[in-house]
Every structure is written in structure tokens, then in C-alpha cells.
Image (spheres, coloured by chain):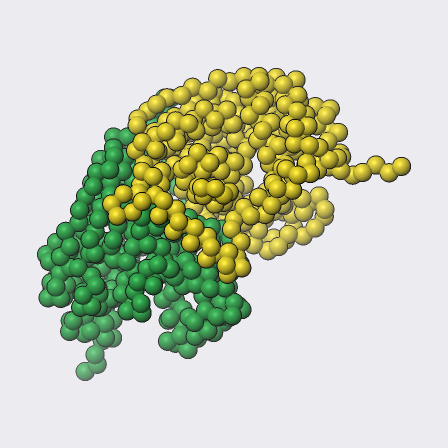
Chain colours: A yellow, B green
Amino acid sequence: MTISPHVLLSLDDAFELSLSVLLRNGMNERHATAVAKSVVAGQRDECHSHGMYRLLVCVRGLRSGKVNGEAEPEVLNVSPALTRVDARGGFSQVAFDVGAEHLVRKADEVGIAALAINNCFHFSALWQEVEALAEMGVAAMAMTPSHSCVAPAGGTKPLFGTNPFAFSWPRPGDFPFVFDFATSVVARGDIELAKRKGERIPLGWAIDKDGNPTEDSNAALEGAMLTFGSYKGSALSAMIELLAGPLLGDLMSFESVALDAGAAITPYHGELLVAFSPERFAGGATSAKANHERAENLFNAIVDQGARLPSQRRFEARARSNRHGVRLDRGLFDEIREL
Amino acid sequence: MTISPHVLLSLDDAFELSLSVLLRNGMNERHATAVAKSVVAGQRDECHSHGMYRLLVCVRGLRSGKVNGEAEPEVLNVSPALTRVDARGGFSQVAFDVGAEHLVRKADEVGIAALAINNCFHFSALWQEVEALAEMGVAAMAMTPSHSCVAPAGGTKPLFGTNPFAFSWPRPGDFPFVFDFATSVVARGDIELAKRKGERIPLGWAIDKDGNPTEDSNAALEGAMLTFGSYKGSALSAMIELLAGPLLGDLMSFESVALDAGAAITPYHGELLVAFSPERFAGGATSAKANHERAENLFNAIVDQGARLPSQRRFEARARSNRHGVRLDRGLFDEIREL
């Protein structure tokens, strides 16, 4: 008898397993449910770096005493267009859920609105958030810093985080148009993976600690990663530091990493979300319905020339997982069960 | 006696020349003043593609009868966070000036606000607009489509415009932090320049009409340009089409180029600007003053490791021009005077 290197779980079983691990490690029902949904969604869409593997990191955060698994987020209705949610040291998921409905209501009322989340431990993929907002009918941007590991273009030292940026556009009757990318060339995990496999990395991903281009994953991890698209990606990364940092009165990547002090907990900082209501923006000679149809013309023109829409692979993975369940590496499955 | 290949003009003389050309080609005082300021600012900052050379394009637009040099922009106060300005077929500068004060006032009041400009001929560099907004105290984003000449990542045909994205952060007592980039790898003018010089272009800038990578500038101009940063730049470019197009009920790049029908007039479409008030966003444990100081720490960390802030070269050029005036190619100077 051979042991399969993978375990197949139904989505319900994957959720129950995640929930039970989180509950017995100090999370209350509300947080555990939100985080379990989030990691199972990552696993379902085959975004493994944001999948059930993250349970290990969550539990490390909870056991360290740094993350509060029972934090009650506090909502501050700053203005008709701005909501602030203080996550009070909890993970971001519950804070997002609480803030999202204010954000969408305000965007529907005044056209554009912002949600500032403060004091949260953030590890979920931003596509989850902007996709949820698109399903509530708005277009949305999300951005957050992380931990310093990326050098600004022309520099030599880690300063920016991998600073993701995500966007969604609602498509009535279809999956939304969604993208979510790191402003670094690749995810830090890609370099860690190359190190584990003893492989070289492509030139352009990173520099060593003296600022020289390197193909050595060890040297890269001791040096700095690079931004995508050279100075343009670097500019975007700086924008994300500013808008999801000082604008909100929260930490930038180099401040969060200093606070972490080597504990390797999920970064602790803020997040900015912006929502746009296609209904409220329409007006004059245009209707929201006609505007949605014109957006579809753009998507058709992309697909008709053989290009893919962003997230297409992810939606295909989702369809597979919805039919067949999710696959989990046997070693990871055992590790999760023992948490 | 040799003729200098350049003409040196004081900023005042450059402005007077630009103003007189625009006035005698059918613009009223208000439009001519705003456009003259804009092209002289481009010349002053040595952004030559947005400098006084643009007077040739402006005049072509005015003489074609397509651009209305006397358009009265119409302001619609949609909500406490949203202003719409119908440029009514004029150039964008006056519409922006009219809308900017509403945008900043609303951002100051509710934290975040948007300005939708519709039905305008847009050719000014976006840094001019976001820099003006930063000087009024807000952080700002600006984006606009253009004319289809860029293929989506994985595609082969022109669909997106060069779709610029700009951002500013106000720095009390200093030039703002400002960037402004095309989401194409390079500006279309860079390929046109290579063609004029008979030079090859680097691989990665463009594809030929069959979708193959090309170093031939003619083949590139008949084919399509590529987005910066591959699929990430392509995703951003699609976002700009959506937010500055269907969201506002205005044209996307492939719709604007169809309307132009080969006349080579400045693209006709909309623009989205978003403003964030650091004062209104501050709150809780943070003050706007402390947040501004923390942003300065980021800028210092960039500069201290030998990297440049975006726009640094432009501000250096501005200082030179403020002292010595602007240099204009003699041939261009003669052409402008004869307009």
C-alpha cells in the first residue's frame, strides 16, 4: 500500500478543519469563521501561498500573543465618504467584513468612498476583498504595505514591502474583472522556494546586500528584491506606502518590520480600500447599464485577440475545486491537524 | 555668422508667444491662458513631448473645427464627494482648473473625493494636474485613456492607449512627491523618434502586426506597443480604461481612436482624478502633522540609499529654466511663430 502525497478534501471539510484549528488556538467564532473562509478560498482558487498553509502562520501569531483572536473591531464613521475601522490588533478579515458594508453604502450614496483599516495583522490576498466588493456592486481598489524586503529603483537596501495592489470591476451575471499583484517582481516565497530547491533565480528579481544583481537565492534573501517594471513599479510601491501608511496614520513596511523584530509574524499595519459606484458615477447622457455594456466590449476585445483576463486561471481552479474539492499536500495536512 | 540651432526664451516670452499663437487661432483668453501655461510648464521642466511643441497639435485641433477653443465647461456637483465637469469639446486645462477647486474642497470636507472630466481633448501631462492638487494640500491620483496603440499582455493587437497614471503627495515647504508614467513600456514618440533616425528599437517595446517581437520601428508602428511590466502593466492599463472610461460614461482608447478616424487630433475622452485629504484622514491617535513627518522619513530613506525621488530631474530642469529661460529648437521656434 502506498500513501498518496496529497489529501483530497471537500470544501466543507477544509473549512471545518480550518475552523477547528483556529478555535482551539484562541480565536473566537467570528474571527475563526472569517479567517477559515479566507484560507479555504485561497486553497480553492489554487493560490497556495494564501491557502490553508497560512493556518501555520495564523497559529504562530496567536500563540505569540501578538495577534488578538478575539479583537472587536471599532467602526468610526468619519464622514459620508470615509469609514475608519480600528482592527485593534486582530487579523484583517473581520475588520474588512465590518467595514465593507459601510464602504459600499457610502460609495452608493456619494459615488466614491474610502475604507481605512488600522492596526491589523494582514495576510489575506487582496483579490478576496476587492472581489467581495465587486459582488456588492462597486469597482474597488485595495492596497497595503507589508514588511521591508524590496529596494526602491536605483537603491540597494530593503525599504518597501512587496506591497500588493488589487482592483475589481463588477460584471453583472459574471465573475468580476479582478487583478491583484505584488509591486515586487515576484513574491518573496518564489525566492524562498528556489532556495529550498537549490535553484538559481533569474537576473532581475533581486540584488545582493552590496546592491549587485544576483542569481543566488541566498544572496537575494540577504539583499533586496526589486520592483516590477523598474522605476514605475517602484513609484507605485511608494504610493502604496504613503496611502496605506501615513495617510491613514498607520505603519509603513520599514516601521512594521522594526516592530516585528524578527518574530516573523504577519505584518501589522493598515490598509486602504477605495470604492467607486458605477451607478452613482453615471449621469448626463450615460446610463450605468450602457457603461457596463461598454466595459464588456473591452473585455471581449481582450479575449477575442487571444489574451486572458486577469484571474481567469483562478476562476478555472475555483470551478475545479467546487466540483472535486481541494488537494492538500499530505505533510501540510498532517501539520495542520496537529496544530 | 552662424545661426544657433536653439533659441533661448525667458519664461515670460515663451508664455507670450504661446498665448498669441493660441489667441490668433481661435481660442478665447481663458483657454489660451490655461493652455499656454501648460505647454510652457512642460517646456520649463524639459518634458519636451508636453512642451511648446504641442502648440502645433493644438492649432491643428482648433483649425480642424473639432476642438472648441471657447468651450464653457459645465460643473455638476453630483454629491459631497463627486464633481463632474463637462468640458464640452474643449481642451482639458480649463475644465481641470474649474473642477480642481471643487475636488479639493470636497476632499477637505469628506476625506476622499473624485473629479470626473467628460468630453475633453486631453494632451497635458498628468503631473501638472496632480502637482497643482498637491500644492492645494491633497494627495491625488489622475488617469486617462488615450488612443489605441498598445496590446494587452498575451494579445497581438492595439487596444489600450499609452494610458498614463499619475500620483502626488503634498510636502509642506517642498516640491510634492510626484510621479506620472505611461503604462506602455515607452511613449509612442520614442518609437517615432527611432523611425526618424533610422534606428532599431530594443526588443520588448513592441510587436509587429502578426504579434511577433520586433526591433524595427516601422513594423512596431504598424503593430502594437507593449505594456510595462508585462501582465501587471496590462492590468493597470485596463483599470485606467475602465475608471476613466465606462465609470464616467466616456470613451475608451479604442472608441476615441475610432472617432478620430485618422485626423490625428488629440484624443477625445474623459479623465478621472481622486483626491485624499491627509488632514481629514488623520484622526484617532495620529495627527496630520505626524503623518507628514513619517512620509518624510520614507523620502529620506529613499534618497539616503542613493535612489532618486520621481520628478527629481524635472525639478532640477525647472530650477535651470527659472534662472536661464527655456531653450527651443530653432526650427520648432520658427514653425510656432508662423502658426
Query: Of residues A202 and B112, which is closer to you in this image?
Result: B112
Q: Is residue B104 above or below residue A92?
A: below
Instruction: Please give left or right for residue A156 compared with residue B272 in the image.
Output: right
Q: Nearer the viewer, residue B333 or A167?
A: A167
Does B145 sit left or right of B70 as displayed? Answer: right
The extreme bottom residue here reads: B1
Residue at the image point whose x is 63% and y is 18% from the top = A23
Identified at 28% across, 69% down, the residue is B263
Quadrant location of the C terminus of chain B? bottom left
Of the 4 image quadrants, the one containing the N terminus of chain B is: bottom left
Q: How many marks?
A: 0
User: Residue shown at 31%/69% (left/top)?
Assistant: B262
Q: Is residue B249 above or below residue A18?
A: below
Residue drawn at 10 percent across, 66 percent down: B24
Residue B287, picture quadrant: top left
Relative placement, left or right, of A40 versus B213 is right
